[in-house]
Amino acid sequence: MLDSINRTPELAEFIIQGVNKDGETFRPSNWGERLSDMLSTTGKDGRIVFSSYLRPMVIQGIPSVVVRFSLEKADPHSFDLVMQFIAANHLKVRAGRNREDAGATGLFPTRNMERRSLNN
């Protein structure tokens, strides 16, 4: 699964793309939110707060999930579940951002860490 990614210490994350190896769009359309929900919490306002380890995004028009490599050490069971999901659904993966661009805060970023100030 991750064999196609040159996994260097500088690489902070990988991206699961909502496309299978045959190029077909993966369904259901909210698969990213469903997968990311396993590490999410509910904020004080009742909204879902996705973990910094696993979060849904649309990247270049493709529904995707960004996964931090640090999840593998912080929560091995969840990382294994993500790997099983990728394999079972034959999804494409690609390298994400490096540590500097991703704003990584060390080897084990805090779960649900907000990078915004309260004034924004």
Image (cartoon, rainbow, N blue to C red):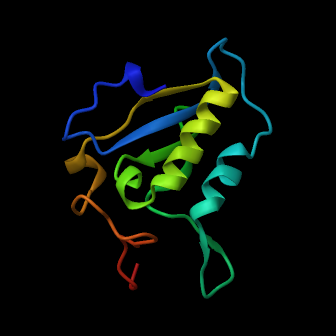
Q: Is residue 28 left or right of residue 55?
A: right
Residue depicted at x 65% and y 50%: 35
Q: Is residue 55 above or below residue 8?
A: below
Quadrant of image for the C terminus: bottom left
Q: Is residue 109 above or below residue 58?
A: below
* Identity of the residue furthest to the bottom in this view: 44
Front-most of residues 39 and 66: 39
Q: Is residue 119 above or below residue 58?
A: below
Residue depicted at x 46% and y 71%: 112
Residue depicted at x 49% and y 25%: 1
Q: How many marks?
A: 0
Residue 55 x %, y %: 53, 54
Residue 45 x %, y %: 64, 85
Residue 56 x %, y %: 58, 50
Decide if residue 63 is in sight here: no
Residue 90 occupies quadrant: top right
* Identity of the residue furthest to the top in this view: 22
